[in-house]
Image (cartoon, coloured by chain):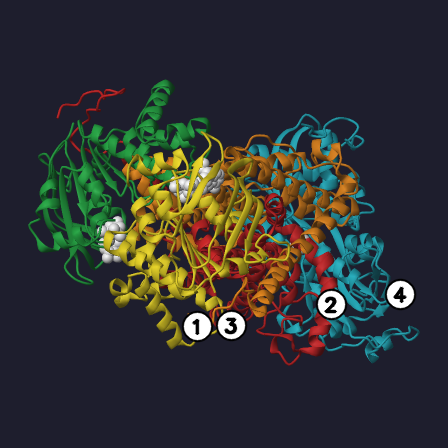
Chain colours: A yellow, B green, C cyan, D red, E orange
Amino acid sequence: MAKQIEVSELDAYYGAHKAIEDITMTIEPRTVTAFIGPSGCGKSTFLRTLNRMHEVVPGARVEGKVRLEDQDLYGPDVDPVSVRRTIGMVFQRPNPFPTMSIYDNVAAGLRLNGRFSRSELDGIVESSLKGANLWNEVKDRLNKPGSGLSGGQQQRLCIARAIAVRPQVLLMDEPCSALDPISTLAIEDLISSLKQDYTIVIVTHNMQQAARVSDKTAFFNLAGQGQPGKLIEMDDTSKIFTNPGEKATEDYITGRFG
Amino acid sequence: MAKQIEVSELDAYYGAHKAIEDITMTIEPRTVTAFIGPSGCGKSTFLRTLNRMHEVVPGARVEGKVRLEDQDLYGPDVDPVSVRRTIGMVFQRPNPFPTMSIYDNVAAGLRLNGRFSRSELDGIVESSLKGANLWNEVKDRLNKPGSGLSGGQQQRLCIARAIAVRPQVLLMDEPCSALDPISTLAIEDLISSLKQDYTIVIVTHNMQQAARVSDKTAFFNLAGQGQPGKLIEMDDTSKIFTNPGEKATEDYITGRFG
Amino acid sequence: TDNNTDADSGAPAAGSSAAAGGLSGTINAAGSSAQGPAIEEWKKSFQSANPGVSLNYQPSGSGAGVQAFVQGTVAFAGSDSALKDDKGEPAQADARCKTGKAINLPMVTGPVAVVYNLPGVDGLQLSPKTIAGIFNSQITKWDDPAIKADNPDAKLPSTAIQAFHRSDESGTSDNFTKFLKTTADWPYEPAKAWPAEAKGQGSKGSDGVASSVKSTEASISYVDLAYAENSQLQKAKVANGSGEFVELTPESAAKTVESAEIVGTGNDLKLSIDYATKAAGAYPIVLVTYEITCEKGLSAEDTKLVKSFLTYTASDEGQQALTGLGYAPLPASLLTKVRTAVEAIS
Amino acid sequence: MVTTSPTREGGPAVRRSAFRRSRGDVPFRFASTGAGVVLLAIMAAVGVFLVVKAIPALQANTANFLTEKIWTPNAVEPQFGIASLAFGTVLSSFLALIIATPVAIGVALFISHYAPRRLAAVLGYVVDLLAAVPSVVYGLWGVTFLVPFMRGPSEFLNTYFAWIPLFGGDQVVGKSMLTASIVLAIMILPIIAAISREVFLQAPKMQEEAALALGATRWEMIRMSVLPFGRPGIISAAMLGLGRAMGETIAVALILPATFGISFQILGPNGNSIAANIANGFGEATAIGRGALIASGLVLFVITLVVNMGARMIIARRKEFARAA
Amino acid sequence: MTTVQTGIQPISTSRRVKDRVVQALVYLAFAIAVVPLLSVLWLVVKNGLARFDLEFLTHSMRNIGARDAGGGAYHAIIGTLEQVLFASLIAVPIGLLTAVYLVEYGSGGRLSRWISFFVDVMTGVPSVVSGLFVLAFWVLALGMPFSGFAGAMALSILMMPVVVRSAEEMLRLVPNDLREASYALGVPKWRTIVKVVLPTAFTGIVTGVMLAVARVAGETAPLLLTVFFTDSINNNPFNGPQMGLPLYVFDQAGRPTDTAIDRAWTGALTLILIVMLLNLVARLIAWWRSPAKRGS
Ligand SMILES: Nc1ncnc2c1ncn2[C@@H]1O[C@H](COP(=O)(O)OP(=O)(O)OP(=O)(O)O)[C@@H](O)[C@H]1O
Ligand SMILES: Nc1ncnc2c1ncn2[C@@H]1O[C@H](COP(=O)(O)OP(=O)(O)OP(=O)(O)O)[C@@H](O)[C@H]1O
Ligand SMILES: [Mg+2]
Ligand SMILES: [Mg+2]
Ligand SMILES: O=P([O-])([O-])[O-]
């Protein structure tokens, strides 16, 4: 079931460098939340703190709380593996497994989580690739390596891989950045259908996209050069795009559309 | 100096797989040409044939002619290195040198090609980073590794690196895909100013961007699943976006805006 | 950067023949590891008396020494056996000497001890037949009747015998198996390589054999006296041709060499040892090690240095310098012949 | 286009238009090709040298070189054959490889993915120390420590696992094939571990993150992204280790009992190898004996070659899926 | 999308157990590797410390008789350092350039297949063969004297395959992205290799070179045939017999006196320390050159 995520007073560091500071927000279940903000303001970093991927970077650490319903993700008994299993992620740069075939790339997460019959796997792989609008392009070469795909195809492959395991929360870091309008549309449709059951967070630079797909929008900004990124405001998407509470938000949104 | 590029009857292969077929076009000097088309249709592949980067992929080869002014780029005496020095490139996936600092990344092309005094280098690095709208964010950490940057920052770093060597032709594969609107604007401004002197080719999925920055637009499409990509039409940007010659182009452009 | 030429680390100046003085240059030599310590000792006196001389002796094995000598990379070779006719070695060596011929000069005797590790059993006595039986894997238990017969009073356990032999080829094995062949019904051709059919366990080098015996109870092997003493291994008394069980001492070993016959011609002093010697108090398993060099035909510098070095080694001082190193001195009669031969080197 | 010096600040650089071949590339290409050719020449010369030296001995041989087990090349009637030596070489080095490879991969993973980051470098250095121990010392250690030590475990294996043919036989000794294989395994361990470690450290972080984000445990992440990426490297490292094991002379010579027979009973007083036999026979070899030893070295070449070709085939089979990161 | 559980879904016990088991095995592997190391080091230190003194490090064995105590390995230390240095000077450039050829230029051509073929074969060559080869060509055919340099040549033959194969492996790990980025800047291939590919693979290459160095620093057999043997100091690597530490250890260990055996252990200890130090220096250089040090 979709989950609410509550973040309170979260800071994230890379070594001594504080990348984001004092972020408090609530991400509603079964909604799409969009993160927007200038490059380098910490959107990816924040997104990665939500499923404990941040701590994978050497020297990186997190302070503060993230709660999924009533569980603290950073609690002492919590296994990051189960967190990531529950909260899936699509990365900013597509990263298919180069040593696996396209099929195995999609099935990779499923194979971890128990036994599936070949036909079950086939079904899930097909539906995931269809969801990511990649099925037609690759159905004839499912056992070819994933690295021989175009940039956009790789990105869709990664999306298919992430949705195949059906996480309860899906974090997507600019999932459409390398996609043409048609694929973008398909992914946006996918997001809309997924939100029936899942909680979705999406980072995007594309204001129209944020406006189109999201229910809530959070705007991040840097306090200044070399300073950590902060959450400036978060509200209903319609409100943010029509009547933002902060001057900075308005400047950013109206500055120029991507 | 800006150069005209003439492509005639060009095919490109990955091993036995023909990725693009029979492309003939003329890219005018001192203009911005945009390539658009669905994911996987061969835009990146075609772009890479223009500066002989395609042949770097193992098993990849090219048939046909590409002429820069009066010289055949694929002529027998032609050194691909000098071709690439003349025709620069920004890749779809940012690829900074991980062993080099930010400064060294930008200076790499200069350093590796000749002797520059430290102050000359300093000047070029600064102006290139400013051109890519990255200077402010990194000026305090020029000697930190380039891999510790956010996705968008890395992309801008790669743009700065490419313009630092001042090629006569600049090929950009989705240079703004990971950029926020402000940086996108800056890059677009950069493109406009560069086109005074250079020939620029840009791959984009963003129709507005194509409409905004380019003088000419080429639309590519796949003949069908598993078939090679083809050039459908190429014309003035205003013409393509208002009154395209082909039905496919119109469908693609009006389908949905990215 | 100390070449140990200073007085405190040098030995007391050696006797007259070593103190030929004033020599300088380098000689390379190679060969038998059994005579390694002897050469060490001789070198010390010789180099102390002639600080300008460097003698490099590579104890890589008799065969390698002979090869190096034939190839001309060394001025003389140390060898546990004389050049062998049946392998054409004298001809090859003569060719190396160009104008002269190669000669075998016996220089020192290395007795071979039969060592064992059997707690509670001292003064083991073994006849050649018993030894052959043990090393041919026919006698496998310590309380075998054959051993009991040799040692009526000993309390022998019924444990299995762990017989070690040299796994590398060696002059020691060669002489040991020659002894067995001559005195007992040893069914294999004597050779430097241990016969594969005889079984047993191999250990590399005299040191390897010594340490295997030392660390393995109920074991037995054969090894040069020096190693037996250094590792404080028990040495068996071995019966000679007259059936007398003789303890191994330098003197008892020297008696066997005394009865050896010179089979070489002229200045070539190749010996034939009688392993079945009946001389009273003679310990029969010995190995005579030679210096092989050119009677004539070495380069001028080599001639001078080799002659002067061998003159010293064959001198009384030279022979006495080896006392306590586990060698037996050459008998006086043989020594005179050696000196004559060295004198003839030119 | 005229060649003009590039204007630096501001304006566009004017460059040579003729796409002529740049100068530095030719010498460098020449140098690296040259190095390859030199290396090839050296290795080929070594090979030719071996063949030339081996021929007289093989001609003098009165036994079948391939099937004969005994080795008496110094006899008046030289008789020698490679059978038992080749068998011992292959058995001991493969045992060593089987023991060492899993441990080495574990060590490499420990350093690249398990040990605390700060400690990892130091611990990596500790394992490299294993490589710093010269082979003579391994031999001496083997003889003075491991040989006596192995008697107990060998007895145990012989008592309870004699049904496994390798552990059968009625005589159990310390100086055995098993002990030699263990020493060899220790000697090749740092080679395999060090190279695998470097390979694992280069595994792309992006793919590791991809696996983790799918909810993979650390081991699953390693299995999904690190090991497949490192596979060719591990195989190459293992081949280097195997080569070392097969060519190792002195350490094995000190431990193996140097018998001439073919027996799978690795606890008994059996075992020899080509390299150990060279060490044992070299000092007393006659000219023919040396030739025979060299001929045995040639056989080692052939074995190495066959094994390496197999390994390269395994690597090539999945080339399409190679780490084209 | 049927049964969706709530809460953080814990992973199955079997997966968790497997993960733990592997973790335990990995730690165990490290422990297994360390045990023999400690055992060897303990033995060497225990036996080697007795003679690890200034005399040992500054004196040769010249004029040390068979029963004398004292003496040292200075001549052998000098010899080993010179031989390993020259061997590396020969083998590392050739090996590295060959690896570059195989990865960057050879592209599976006939020459590169032949080179790979011979490199593979050479990985298993018994060390004495390289010594025999140099003896035959350098000493016997060309009439050159025994010398440290002859030994270095023999050692370099043993080093080359290790250097080539490990460097080849490391170069293949360098992502093609980086080469492409450099080519696209109009950087010639050779500068790309020198400035981008080699630095990226640097630590790995250093590791491979150190493995090769460690291997040959402990070789005995090839030295016997090429540097010969001496008890005296010879600083000149190009003329006259030299000593090497492995040779020294091997020789002393085979002697029948306890003083010699003590010297052997001390020699072994010295040799281990030398290789350790070289390794440490190499690693420090690698670390100092690495971006990780400069970054963050
Ligand atoms: N390295 C490769 N090996 C094999 N096939 C490849 C490789 N790279 C791309 N292709 C195939 O070539 C075709 C064209 O790819 P290309 O990367 O040029 O597409 P594109 O138009 O740039 O797409 P995108 O917008 O997604 O980046 C695709 O079918 C792709 O799968
Ligand atoms: N691995 C890292 N090590 C050190 N600093 C990092 C690292 N990754 C990111 N940073 C820094 O942290 C800050 C936030 O980066 P982040 O990637 O979260 O930005 P972002 O909002 O996702 O930007 P973009 O839109 O460009 O992807 C930036 O200043 C960046 O340079
Ligand atoms: Mg980001
Ligand atoms: Mg593309
Ligand atoms: O080296 P040997 O004395 O046994 O010939």
Q: CA distance from mark 3 to mark 1?
A: 71 Å
Describe the element under mark 4 as helix, strand or loop. Answer: loop
Task: Give, as a three-letter code, the residue at label 3.
Answer: Glu
Location of residue E150 in the rendering, given as x and y in whole percent from the top left corner: 50, 40
Q: Which mark is residue C319?
A: none
> Between A133 and C26, which is closer to the camera in this rendering?
A133
The amino acid marked with disc number 2 is: Arg
Residue closest to the far right: C153
Q: Position of residue A10 (x, y in %)?
A: 55, 44
Residue C317, picture quadrant: top right
Q: Is mark 4 within 8 Å of ligand 5?
A: no
Q: Position of residue E63 (x, y in %)?
A: 73, 35
Query: Which residue lies under the disc numbered 4?
Result: C123
Query: Helix, strand or loop at disc 1?
Result: loop
Asked if both marks, 4 and 1, belong to the same chain, the answer given is: no
- Quarter of the image for residue C211 reads bottom right
The image's mark for residue D151 is: 2
Residue E262 left/right relative to A76: right
Badge 4: chain ID: C
Mark 2 Cα-neighbour bin, 10 Å: few <14, some 14–19, many ≥20: some
Say what amino acid the circle numbered 4 marks: Gly
Q: Are discs 1 and 2 less than 8 Å apart at CB?
A: no
Q: Nearer the viewer, residue C107 or E274?
A: E274
Residue designated by label 1: E2
Q: Chain of mark 2?
A: D
Residue B51 lies left or right of residue B149; in this view the side is left
